[in-house]
Image: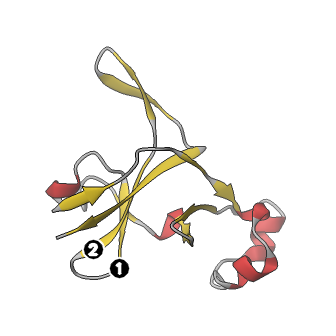
Amino acid sequence: MKIITNSVPRDVIHAWELTKTERAEFDYLDWEAIEDGRDSADFVRYRGELYNLSDTDSGYSTMPPELKGWDAYVSDSFFSGVLFRYPREDYMGRSVEIDTDRVVCGRYFT
């Protein structure tokens, strides 16, 4: 499996920052609940696409072993997809603080 990334963290985009046109792409979200604070959603823009970070497959139990070190992914075919990793502060070789305001993106393919 090949992974391509520039390892540069991108700012997370909060739901309230989206335009009406961008919101229309995510019509399954409860925008009324988001606007009045009962719900939230975070996004990231990568290679011209806007990704809802809640729509990713994540968790170490579901991550393929080849994607170790990444937090989540979205498949765009059986052979490829987009990867997401939150930057971490390391202390004595252990990740102790996750920066949830930024995300590193990459692509994978076989």
Q: Where residue 74 sits in the image (x, y, percent)?
A: 38, 70
Q: Amino acid at mark 1?
A: Asp
Label 2–label 1 contact, CB within 8 A: yes
Q: Is residue 55 above or below residue 103?
A: below
Residue furthest to the top: 92
Q: Is residue 29 left or right of residue 96?
A: right
- Residue at the location (55% across, 43% down)? 100
Q: Which residue is mark 2?
A: 80
For the image, the number of numbered tags is: 2
Q: Secondary structure at mark 2?
A: strand
Q: Nearer the viewer, residue 97 or 21?
A: 21
Q: Where residue 75 sits in the image (x, y, percent)?
A: 33, 75
The image quarter containing residue 89 is: top left
- Dividing the image into 4 quarters, which one contains the N terminus? bottom left
**C-alpha separation, residue under disc 2 versus residue under disc 1:** 6 Å
- Dividing the image into 4 quarters, which one contains the C terminus? bottom left
Q: Is residue 69 above or below residue 2?
A: above
Q: Is residue 24 above or below residue 44?
A: below
Q: Is residue 107 left or right of residue 23?
A: left
Q: Which residue is mark 1?
A: 76
- Residue at the location (60% across, 44% down)? 101
Q: Where residue 48 sits in the image (x, y, percent)?
A: 56, 71
